[in-house]
């Protein structure tokens, strides 16, 4: 039998197969963002965040030399007054617009909502491109970045002259994850700024942290003004030797954990993300843990709700044990 013969190639069919093959390869290939989408340099964002926190701190200091202009923004669910002062607004003006004007394609979210027309003497930040030169440059899409700022954390204590708790804070998130945190303390012998950039660098005071709390003694920080049901959680979660320490300002409390002055920080009531984002970034970058009471990471995307209602657990050591105890506790199940 003769199996020989001529195979005719259908040119149209061959062309169709080639087109389908190209489309298949294109579909499987990782997509790249368009070249014209706005990008930002994260090192410059960090530099701007440092400048903003320090400029805001000067406004907070200045506020103590004049009338505070204290008003009320309402009350918490626990019935605690939420004060706001002229210093809150003045700090917001320099921090919010300083960053927003420098990075117009980045969403900036602030605790205060003062409009630009009410902000006077606005000045742009002059950044030194050689500053923080030991850090790696990294460009990311502006749409993936959000900046959360708290122009004056612990306002109530500020009005009571408990200045040790007062901070200004800036946090940078990328795709919802907090990657840069800045916490500035304007009071004390001299202003002090702590910062960290995940997997890239941190301020000198955060580089070497010795845990000053022993295995059998646990200082657990809770909020003075938002205690809620949290006092009942201390012993079940942290053990009978845990010592409850009331303090103000989420930035202050998280930083105390990050530098090893406290074992943990726990919060069970609603809290705004501008209160916790910077501390989350710093504690995580220094090897600690910051999550909801259920162990879930907190989403800081620009389109996420500004209010976090699932509680906070922050710790350096024994976090898995604390979290396991928190999950078993009936008081946290409804959080």
Image (cartoon, grey):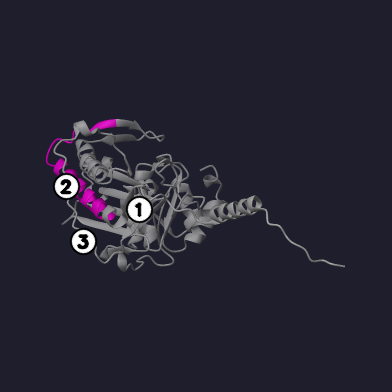
Q: Earlier in the sequence, mark 2 or mark 3?
A: 2
SS label for mark 2: helix
Residue at mark 1: 279
Judged by depth in the image, the label closer to the viewer, 1 or 3, is: 3
329 vs 151, left or right, is right
Judged by depth in the image, the label closer to the viewer, 2 or 3, is: 3
Q: Earlier in the sequence, mark 1 or mark 3?
A: 3
Most foreground residue, 127 or 292: 127
- How many marks the image carries: the answer is 3
Residue sitting at 31 percent across and 67 percent down? Answer: 207
Label 2 with label 1: CB-CB less than 8 Å? no
| Up-down relation of residue 266 to residue 272 (above or below) | below
67 vs 228, left or right, is left
Q: Which mark is residue 58?
A: 2
Residue at mark 3: 131
Q: Residues within 10 Å of mark 3 (few under 14, many from 20)?
A: few
Q: Is 311 in the magenta?
A: no
| Separation (CA) of disc 1 from disc 3 | 23 Å
Magenta segment boundaries in residue numbering: 46-72
User: Could you say which quadrant of the image residue 6 lies in?
Assistant: bottom right
What is the x, y in percent for residue 70?
22, 33
User: Could you say which quadrant of the image residue 75 lies in?
Assistant: top left
């Amino acid at each position: 039998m003769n199996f020989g013969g001529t195979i005719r190639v259908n040119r149209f069919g061959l062309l169709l197969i080639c087109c389908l093959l190209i489309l298949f390869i294109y579909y499987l290939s990782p997509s790249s963002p368009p070249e014209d989408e706005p990008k930002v340099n994260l090192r410059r964002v960090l530099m701007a965040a440092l400048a903003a926190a320090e400029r805001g701190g000067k406004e907070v200091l200045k506020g103590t030399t004049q009338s505070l202009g204290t008003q009320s923004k309402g009350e918490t669910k626990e019935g605690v007054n939420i004060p706001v002062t002229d210093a809150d607004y003045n700090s917001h003006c320099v921090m919010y617009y300083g960053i927003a004007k420098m990075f117009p394609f980045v969403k900036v979210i602030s605790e205060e909502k003062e409009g630009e027309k009410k902000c006077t003497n606005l000045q742009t930040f002059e950044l030194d491109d050689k500053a923080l030169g030991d850090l790696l440059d990294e460009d990311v899409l502006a749409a993936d970045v959000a900046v959360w700022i708290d122009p004056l954390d612990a306002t109530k204590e500020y009005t009571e002259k408990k200045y040790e708790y007062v901070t200004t804070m800036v946090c940078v998130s990328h795709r919802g994850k907090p990657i840069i945190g800045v916490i500035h303390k304007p009071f004390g012998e001299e202003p002090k700024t702590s910062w960290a950039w995940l997997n890239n660098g941190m301020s000198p005071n955060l580089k070497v942290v010795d845990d000053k709390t022993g295995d059998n003694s646990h200082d657990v920080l809770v909020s003075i003004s938002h205690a809620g049901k949290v006092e009942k959680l201390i012993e079940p979660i942290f053990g009978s030797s845990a010592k409850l320490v009331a303090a103000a300002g989420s930035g202050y409390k998280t930083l105390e954990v990050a530098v090893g002055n406290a074992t943990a920080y726990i919060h069970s009531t609603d809290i705004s993300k501008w209160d916790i984002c910077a501390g989350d970034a710093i504690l995580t970058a220094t090897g600690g843990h910051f999550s909801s009471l259920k162990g879930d990471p907190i989403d800081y995307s620009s389109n996420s709700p500004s209010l976090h209602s699932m509680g906070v657990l922050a710790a350096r050591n024994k976090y898995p044990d604390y979290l396991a105890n928190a999950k078993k506790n009936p008081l946290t199940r409804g959080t």
